[in-house]
Image (cartoon, coloured by chain):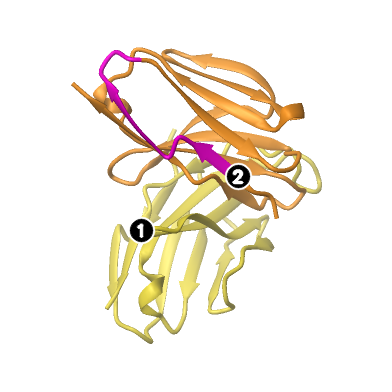
Chain colours: A yellow, B orange
Amino acid sequence: EAGVTQSPTHLIKTRGQQATLRCSPISGHTSVYWYQQALGLGLQFLLWYDEGEERNRGNFPPRFSGRQFPNYSSELNVNALELEDSALYLCASSLVVGSTGQGTDTQYFGPGTRLTVL
Amino acid sequence: GIQVEQSPPDLILQEGANSTLRCNFSDSVNNLQWFHQNPWGQLINLFYIPSGTKQNGRLSATTVATERYSLLYISSSQTTDSGVYFCAVNSGGYQKVTFGTGTKLQVIP
């Protein structure tokens, strides 16, 4: 069974540009999560998509956005890039148990996309 | 929001030694996971353990939900165990996972 895949592996952009990161979940998983791991800041929750809808987002500005496609793959878009957006962006997928998302199944992570903003 | 703290922050072990990593959380949780992040940044799921005890080879984990902590045990450590260990919790119905501060483990031969 294929795991979570992410592309590209590395991405270099300059300030003010836009970045698009992609994630394909494990087959059968409907939920996709995005996390940011910036140097010295640990792992921060960004976004949760399930069944094509944004269900929750972390404490990030609106220039961080995304979407989930009918095949459950997902895109993370970061507009107006700033230097502090340089980070490892991790995507995870899981099944979701329950109508409100409580008691979720295990999250499985992709290898990440390392974004560098110059 | 919920606070998740891990201890110790750093740990150096001789190969073959045992260790215990701790995760404390400030509120009740729906689920808890332990992850190992290898030196290349890949996060590997170790345990999904909202309560009780689980074992997988040299690793085992125990979560005492009523006392708001979880422990990860590593026995007979190997150099490949090096990396950062995170616990992550979900404390509501909205899948907003909160990660702990991490324990950086270095196993030396």
Q: Position of residue A33 (x, y in %)?
A: 56, 54
Residue drawn at (30%, 82%), measured in percent from left and top? A14
> Does residue A104 appear in the picture of this structure?
yes
Give the numbered dot on residue B4: 2
Q: B78 or A49, which is in the foreground?
A: B78
| Most distant residue in the right direction | A99
**Quadrant housing the C terminus of chain A:** bottom left
Residue A43 lies, with reference to residue B71, above or below; the image says below
Numbered label attached to residue A101: none
Q: CA distance from mark 1 to mark 2?
A: 25 Å
Q: Dot 2: within a 10 Å radius of its alpha carbon, few (fewer than 14), some, or many (20 or more) residues?
A: many
User: Mark 1 belongs to which amino acid?
Assistant: Thr
Q: Which subunit holds the residue at mark 1? A: A
Determine whether, in the image, residue A113 is placed left or right of residue B5: left
Q: Quadrant of residue A94?
A: top right
- Position above or below: A55 against B105: below
The secondary element bearing badge 1 is classed as strand
What is the magenta range?
A: B4-17
Q: Mark 1 or 2, which is nearer the eye? A: 2
**SS at circle 2:** strand
Query: Where A66 sits versus B89, above or below?
Result: below
Does A21 appear in magenta?
no
The residue positioned 63% from the left and 35% from the top of the image is B32
Between residues B65 and B8, which one lies in front from this camera angle?
A: B8
Image location (x, y in percent) of residue B109: 18, 21
Q: Quadrant of the N terminus of chain A?
A: top left
Can you tell which quarter of the image residue A97 is in?
top right
Along the horizontal axis of the image, is B108 left or right of A98? left
Q: Residue at x 65, y 40 (%)?
A: B25
Q: Check disc 1 and report the residue beneath it.
A: A113
- The reply to whether dot 1 and dot 2 touch (C-beta < 8 Å) is no
